[in-house]
Image: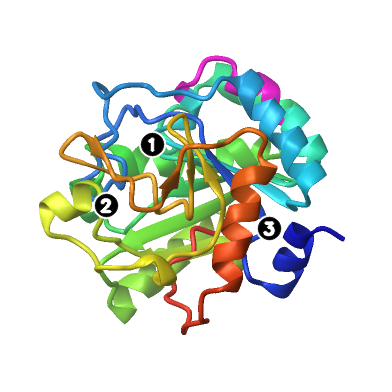
Amino acid sequence: MTLLTEAVRDGAIGGRLWVYANYHCNLQCAYCLTESGPLVARRELSPERLQELAVEARAAGFTALGVTGGEPFLVPGLAAVLPALAKRMPTLVLSNGTLFTDRLIDQLRPLAGLDFAIQISLDSAEPDRNDEMRAPHNFAKVVAAVPRLQAAGIRVRIATTSEGLGQGELERLCNLHRSLGVPDHDHIVRPIVRRGRAAEQGLGADVVRRDLPAELTITADGAFWSPFGPTVRGGRLDTDLLTRTTSPLTVPAAAMVRVAQGTPRSEPAGLGVV
């Protein structure tokens, strides 16, 4: 058993390796950690690099793979490599849910029956409230996409990011996702973190490293402590949670284990991506 597998088994770090497929996006959400938008630099990891990372991750002892961005489905060729990733290890892709054309859904059909899910953002059961933080017509596109993905055999999860939902609002949102066939265990509620665009907008909770999930995260810029780490503010990458070395993957993984095992445990902050 390697130090990494021991650390994952003991809960010192998470078993999922996160990769930022890109930084650009077709939306420009008010609380985006990476200041993603249509005009930002792409900073992509190619589909070929994603496959290399999945191979390394499994060999190193990671137990799952998470793909985020930006909007990952803007990366050319991503859909074609997802079956290979999901056959190697359980795979989760985070998406804003707005790009699921008939053509893209057809490309995703080979994922049916594999350990794979798409996690789609939906912040409110009220269309106007959801779209205010995300983009016009976002709510309608998400609500239309979920059943179409499910019909293609794709598991769908819903992620809600908010400064706090009242009990009534949360209940309405839960009723909505249940009506779409998404069970409670596939609904994630997380706070806004005051990094990236959220900091510019004065939104969210201030956090330090010990508040963030210890989940190794790889981007085009390097390796980060957490998927909440590769943030951008005012067009500049935050480097407080960064190490530049990403290859071989065992190097940043070992460094993360050393730090995690030397860090006193704190109460869970409820900031998990999954």
**Distance (Cα) linking label 1 and label 3:** 32 Å
* Residue where numbered disc 3 is placed: 15
Q: Position of residue 88 (x, y in %)?
A: 81, 38
85 up-or-down from 7: above or below: above
148 up-or-down from 99: above or below: below
Disc sitting over residue 221 in the figure: none
| Range drawn in magenta | 74-82
- Residue at (23, 64) in percent of width and height: 204
* Residue where numbered disc 2 is placed: 130
8 or 99, which lies in front? 8
Residue 189 can be seen, yes or no: yes
SS of the residue at dot 1?
helix
Magenta run includes residue 75: yes
Task: Judge from the rendering whether residue 222 lies leftward or rightward of residue 129; answer left or right.
Answer: right
Mark sitting earlier along the chain (1/2):
2
> Image quarter for residue 135?
top left
50 or 94, which lies in front? 50
Magenta run includes residue 45: no
The amino acid type of the residue labelled 1 equals Lys
The amino acid type of the residue labelled 2 equals Asn
**Distance (Cα) linking label 2 and label 3:** 31 Å
SS of the residue at dot 2?
helix
Mark sitting earlier along the chain (2/3):
3
Is the C terminus in the top left, top right, bottom left or bottom right quadrant?
bottom right
- Residue at (67, 19) in percent of width and height: 80
31 or 160, which lies in front? 31
Determine the main secondary structure of the stretch shown in magenta.
helix
269 or 246, which lies in front? 246
Disc sitting over residue 141 in the figure: 1
Task: Tell me if mark 2 has few (under 14), some (14-19) or many (20+) residues whose alpha carbon lies within 10 angstroms of its own.
Answer: many
